[in-house]
Amino acid sequence: MKKYIFSRRAIIAASLTCLLLPLNSCDKDLEVTPYSYFTTANFFSNADEAYMATLGVYESMSSLDSYGWNISLIFDADTDIEQMSGIGADDWRTIAHYQGISQTTTFYTAWSKLYEGVDRANVVIERIPNMDLFTNGTQTQKDQLNRMLGEAKFLRGFYYSELVRLWGDVPFKTKSSQSGDNLKVGLVDRYEIYKQIIKDMQEAALVLPEETPKDERINKWAAKAMLARVAMFAGGYSLGADGTTKRPSNYKEYYQLAQKEINDVMAQNPYKLNPSYSKVFKNQCQHVLEPTENIFQVAFYNPAGTLGNASWVGNFNGPATANGVYPSNISRCLVPKPFYTSFNAADQRRDFSIATYSINNLGNKLPLLTTNQDERWTVGKWSREYQTNATAERVYTHINWVIMRYSDLLLMRAEVENELNEGPNAIAYDAINQVRKRAFGADIQGSRIGITLGNKGTGYTNAANVVIQITGGGGTDAAAAVITLASGGIGTIGMLRSGDGYTSAPTVTITSTDGKGTGATATAQLLAKPTAAVINLPTGLSKENFLKAIQQERAWELSGEGMRRADLIRWGILGDKLAETSTAVKAIRSTYFYPSITNFVAGKHELYPYPQNETDVNKSITRQNPKY
């Protein structure tokens, strides 16, 4: 089980730093006063106090205002692979459907959390080098303090990279807020900010430990991996203040930096793919730390089951679940059907990532495979069926939000090599094929299964009450359900998940929760494993076609993990993908729910508006982002 960096004691200690204010946080002039003991000169007197202050920098991530909900889940929609449910005035709907405005509260809460993290980091970066122990302590104490200094520098760089990704040019400050400071600083060009982000992350990597972490704290290799991502975003397309979307003229220099950092990581080989794709997310749901798969993650720990340090992962973004065997959830993250049909049927990511079913109070899966039920398909990776279902996790969960996995880094490597070599080389092919090999279960003993209906039985009155149980065979995750009845018998059944790891055909049993119906039978069959020709990308692809393959692979591999909208923006294809998906869903039915195409405006919605709460106070922000 994971060792939380936020124990009960650490939450209380770290949360004291919440009074280290962001740049502006109310509608009047601020007098920044050191409300917290953390801001006083007599703090930072020993390593424990420095550690508590450093945890406070991490803690800004562990909130619904940041990565527990807003930035992770809401800000990643709507795209070609995910959208929010319904129409309404809720911030999480208006933002996702490209209707957010400067007065939308969620923009301000996320903005404030990121700047809170920046300011807390500034305090740590300033105070630790002034500690007596930093110069005169034991080597162990010096190493500890240098690590904390590196963590603060990395986190400052990370928070600024997120501000730039979401808002473009933003206010920039590398000094902690003090009484009498002028907090009303103007916008700074994003590429100037990128210089400091890169510097912070490079300096952090020099002092962070190389060892595999035992908790959610950043280490050397994770800092380098995240720096590679930052460099790729800096070298990607972004919307400028003049309303044009372009990449910088020296973009290849950023890709070269990304290549160097990725190569440094790969030379040390600290990461590996879990052979089972599904196990990655089951481990997340069960709080099993997997630091060789999950490179950088946000810690959530909420022992009271209330709002503080809370996550909505697995509540907001899972299959619709009725309260009963499992806690209920609100299942707001929908998956458009064209994304489902884009998968190869043998790709095990499809049926695990996308829930084509709901779960009733008995814990049974109810198929959503008829009429227009395909509009209710949801993200499936963090289903309630995999969670602890502890009392404290019935509303807000302890599930960490993983910002980068190893497969992400492999796909970044493939993309960088393709870009810098004007086409894919052996390194690029190997990187993407490693991801695809895992996706098709190549390194798992056994295979997927299919199910064939035998006797149709008699007396069944409601397909939703018929349960298909699959037991034995050595595998996991296979699930099937009755779709239709015919004259009291079972008409059709459908596979909800083909599973993996089956070494023999499992037993299939058909029962009824209402006691009505009998005699139906079905048998399972092992499905042949995909060949290397199916798994691996075809050789000889052009640079353009290989990039398209990477763009699709990142969708299949990382769906629902918070990066798709950002990826589409840095590739300069967000509007194109929205239009393409709208055409595809309207071909299914003209009424298919997909509102973003009506609202999206190119040259506007690639950035968010500066929050009005901020611009009302900070008159040094003299413009709004384009078209807002």
Image (cartoon, rainbow, N blue to C red):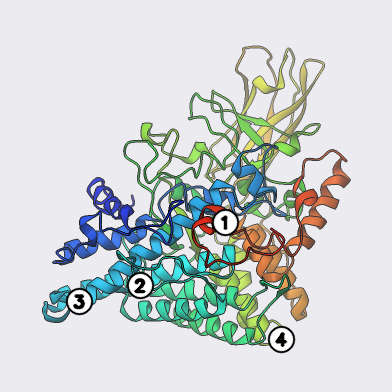
> Nearest the camera: 315 or 107?
107
Q: Residue at x 56, y 71 (%)?
A: 410
Disc 1 versus disc 3: nearer the observer: 3
Disc 3 marks which amino acid? Asn
Disc 2 marks which amino acid? Lys
Considering only order in the chain, which callout, 1 or 2, is on the residue closer to the N terminus? 2
Q: Give the CA separation, mark 2 to mark 4.
A: 42 Å
Q: Is residue 539 left or right of residue 210?
A: right
Residue 612 against residue 588 in the figure, above or below = below
Considering only order in the chain, which callout, 4 or 2, is on the residue closer to the N terminus? 2
Considering only order in the chain, which callout, 4 or 3, is on the residue closer to the N terminus? 3
Q: Residue at x 85, y 52 (%)?
A: 583
Q: Residue at x 66, y 70 (%)?
A: 570
Residue 482 against residue 255 in the figure, above or below = above
Q: Position of residue 379 (x, y in %)?
A: 61, 45
Disc 4 versus disc 1: nearer the observer: 1
> Nearest the camera: 523 or 561?
561
Q: Give the CA separation, mark 3 to mark 2.
A: 15 Å
Considering only order in the chain, which callout, 3 or 1, is on the residue closer to the N terminus? 3
Q: Which residue is mark 2?
A: 175
Disc 3 versus disc 2: nearer the observer: 2
The label shown at residue 130 is: 3
